[in-house]
Image (cartoon, grey):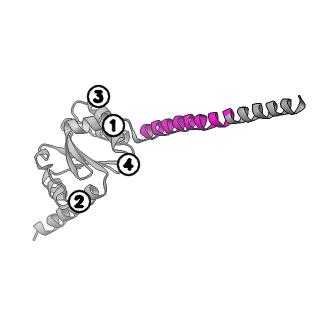
Amino acid sequence: MADKPVRADKATAVAELSEQFRSSQATVLTEYRGLTVAQITKLRRALGKETTYAVAKNTLAKRAAADAGIRGLDELFTGPTALAFVSGDVVTAAKGLRDFARTNPALVIKGGVFEGKAMSAAEVTRLADLESREVLLARLAGAMKANLSKAAALFQAPLSKTARLVAALQEKREKEAAG
């Protein structure tokens, strides 16, 4: 009988993790062996409000991932595992994890899942090397603005040439009529 509350707690934990897997844009699995509580707290702050960093038991996390329909992560659930559930910009979260791991080698990025597909640690790092969503949108807006300016100049050029031509023709007619 003493096992029942524990099983209920485990079922609740699996259900919560499954929901986080489903509702997140991406999830990054890390190994945190050797990090202090203060370092983990610092990492959580660095990741921001749109990323939840949670330590999880491998068996429960593996079951939750399977319940959420995520495949290909089973081999990553070894050693002490913490999960970064990203609900915001995935690139920003990946950069935060990568940069923290550079200064704190005890944090090891194992891999993750993005858009329902398993990713290796190298793919998470490549994701971190991309520009953030805001930077990409700013570049796109800049490129569009530049192209619109060029287009406006192209459209205005024939109009100004036509206006000058009409003015010249009108001048010529006036001279012919006067002369």
| Residue pointed to by mark 1 | 96
Q: Nearer the viewer, mark 1 or mark 4?
A: 4
Q: Is residue 25 magenta?
A: no
Could one spot residue 39 in this view of the protein?
A: no
Q: Position of residue 168 (x, y in %)?
A: 76, 30
Badge 2 crowding class, 10 Å Cα cut-off, few under 14, some 14 to 19, many 20 or more, is: many
Residue at figure coordinates x 18%, y 38% from the top left? 33
The circle drawn on residue 88 is: 4
Q: Earlier in the sequence, mark 4 or mark 2?
A: 2
Q: Which secondary structure lies at badge 2?
A: helix
In the figure, residue 31 lies in which quadrant? top left
Q: Secondary structure at mark 3?
A: helix
Residue 84 placement, left or right of 48: left
Categorize mark 3 by other alpha carbons within 10 Å: few (<14), some (14-19), many (20+).
Answer: few
**Spatial separation of the CA atoms under disc 2 and disc 1:** 24 Å
The mark closer to the camera, 3 or 1, is 1
Q: Which residues are magenta?
A: 135-161
Task: Name the residue carrying label 2.
Answer: 18
Nearest the viewer among 116 and 11 is 116
Q: Any magenta on residue 149?
A: yes
